[in-house]
Amino acid sequence: MMPAMSSVKLFAKSLAVLLFSLTLINPAAGAVVPRSGSKSCGNDTAGPKPNPRRFGFLLPRAFDVIDVFGPLDILQALSRQTHLDMVLLSRTLDPVTTQPGSAAMNKFNSSFFPTVVPTHTFADAPPIDVLVVPGGAAARSPDLGPEIAYIQKVFPSLQYLITICTGAGIAAQSGVLDGHRATTNKAAWGTVTPMGPKVKWVSPARWVEDGKVWTSSGVTAGLDLTFEFVKQKYDNGSAIAEMIAGSTEHVIIKDWRDDPFSAKFNVPPSN
């Protein structure tokens, strides 16, 4: 009886060693949690992702609030899943107001314009991977020289340039969108597209991805662009984007061509 018991114990030990060896070959056999950098979401493509870390937000006077804080809120949630750095860029370190510089754009003399304190100036800005350019009344300003010069200077070193709404007009004036497919707010199509005569303006489009250039249509389209950016550029990005969208109760528009505003504002199909 004793030899039989010894054989059972020996068999059990051998089986345990075999199972442990299998987990080294196939982590799924041992329910091993994927390490950082591996892919666990079926919607994510294979291979390493760029994982941009340093985001700069351009703050021209009279920028649209959601153009900045919509994408920023999504990226802030992402920063709880991976390390990110944020840079708020302006001409000086003085608070930047969202109030238009032109009295004609504030005919009721309202005071409903928040201010944002920059972290860096264009002169002392640290290296960044992504630059986000917002629109709003800022895009119609005749005084954008420093902003345009900064975009021209930093563009070659960026991994990605993102424009929100009429921010495409600001970027277009710098020349960096020349030859690229891009889109913008359809309600402002007739005003913005002449700012970039060499840009391949796309309609209908909620957002457009063209290499390192990402552009979105009207204000809230920047949310869907940012969710798509998270999906494509970060490990487990699809799962993270869905988690953030769920917590904010936002239904992501996943089709970049889903753009009813082109028809609404009589913008013909192009590019």
Image (cartoon, rainbow, N blue to C red):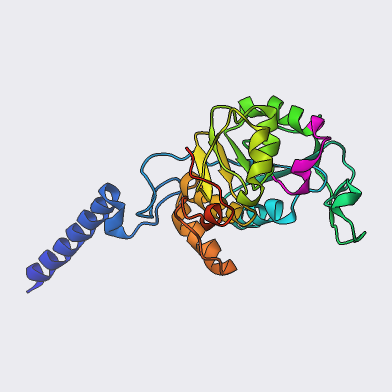
Q: In the figure, is residue 143 to the left or right of 76?
A: right
Q: Quadrant of residue 172 in the image?
A: top right
Q: In the figure, is residue 128 to the left or right of 225?
A: right
Magenta segment: does it hold 80? no
- Viewer-side residue, 215 vs 141: 141
Q: Is residue 25 visible?
A: yes
- Viewer-side residue, 67 vs 34: 67
| Residue pictured at 13% horizontal, 67% vertical | 8
Q: In the figure, is residue 250 to the left or right of 68?
A: left
179 above or below 28? Answer: above
| Residue pictured at 47% horizontal, 55% vertical | 258
Total number of numbered discs in the rendering: 0
Magenta segment: does it hold 145? yes
Indicate the quadrant containing the N terminus: top left, top right, bottom left or bottom right.
bottom left
Q: Position of residue 260 (x, y in %)?
A: 52, 57
266 above or below 167? Answer: below
Q: Position of residue 79 (x, y in %)?
A: 61, 53
| Residue pictured at 60% horizontal, 52% vertical | 222
Q: Position of residue 271 (x, y in %)?
A: 47, 37
Q: Position of residue 89 (x, y in %)?
A: 77, 40
| Residue pictured at 67% horizontal, 40% vertical | 192
Q: Is residue 88 visible?
A: no
Q: In the figure, is residue 268 to the left or right of 156?
A: left
- Viewer-side residue, 148 vs 119: 148
Q: Identify the magenta region.
A: 134-146
